[in-house]
């Protein structure tokens, strides 16, 4: 059995499992209602979206599931590999998934007006970065509540 720090490539299903676990972690921190935990809650919740978008990327470009590090790929393939395994740029990942944008923009149901889910996703994507883990700034639990609420709504449609 490996340890939690082992580097590994995950399948889309495994990434979705990780996303659910990190969302539960974010919720646990949010439920503490302590502003000191708000940054951690938001960071973990944003990571949920990263995992789900990367799962979509792996499904769209199935060769990525078996790709190994190499310097001999065409530039476009190397970019996809980097987005999946070396980067945390949600906007760049989403750019590779126009069908996600289209599906969320066109979704119109009794719960959501047309475009609302994509607007929520775009809001998260534009704000979240891995640099939150190094931030000396603190946010409030109210802001974390709103951020996590958006992620909770969107994640169900990204699965």
Image (spheres, helix red, strand yellow):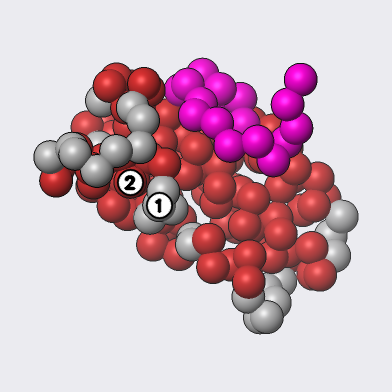
Q: Is residue 81 in the magenta section? A: no
In which image quadrant can residue 127 be found? bottom left
Task: Measure the alpha-carbon separation of dots 2 and 1.
Answer: 6 Å
The residue positioned 49% from the left and 43% from the top of the image is 49
Mark 2 / mark 1, whichever is N-terminal: 2
In which image quadrant can residue 157 be found? top left
In the figure, is residue 89 to the left or right of 37? Answer: left
Q: Is residue 7 in the magenta section? A: yes
Residue 58 versus residue 25 in the image, above or below = above
Q: Identify the residue under disc 2.
A: 82
Circles 2 and 1 in contact, beta carbons < 8 Å: yes
In the figure, is residue 133 to the left or right of 75? Answer: right
The stretch of residues the image draws in magenta is 1-18
In the figure, is residue 157 to the left or right of 91? Answer: right
The residue positioned 73% from the left and 36% from the top of the image is 4
Q: Main secondary structure of the magenta part?
A: loop
Q: Position of residue 141 (x, y in %)?
A: 73, 65
- Which SS class for mark 1? loop
The label number, if any, that marks residue 87 in the structure image: 1
Residue 37 versus residue 77 in the image, above or below = below
The residue positioned 59% from the left and 67% from the top of the image is 132
Q: Is residue 109 visible?
A: no
Density class for disc 1 (Cα within 10 Å; few <14, some 14-19, many ≥20) is some
């Amino acid at each position: 059995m490996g340890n939690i720090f082992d580097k590994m490539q995950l399948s889309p299903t495994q990434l979705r499992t990780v996303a659910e676990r990190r969302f539960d972690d974010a919720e646990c921190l949010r439920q503490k209602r302590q502003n000191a935990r708000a940054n951690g809650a938001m960071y973990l919740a944003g990571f949920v979206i990263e995992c789900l978008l990367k799962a979509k990327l792996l499904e769209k470009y199935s060769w990525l599931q078996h790709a190994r590090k190499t310097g001999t790929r065409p530039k476009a393939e190397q970019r996809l590999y980097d987005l999946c395994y070396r980067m945390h740029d949600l906007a760049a990942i989403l750019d590779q998934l126009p069908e996600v944008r289209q599906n969320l923009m066109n979704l119109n149901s009794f719960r959501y007006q047309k475009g609302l889910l994509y607007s929520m996703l775009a809001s998260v994507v534009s704000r979240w970065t891995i640099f939150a883990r190094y931030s000396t700034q603190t946010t409030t639990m109210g802001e974390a509540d709103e951020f996590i609420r958006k992620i909770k709504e969107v994640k169900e449609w990204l699965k």
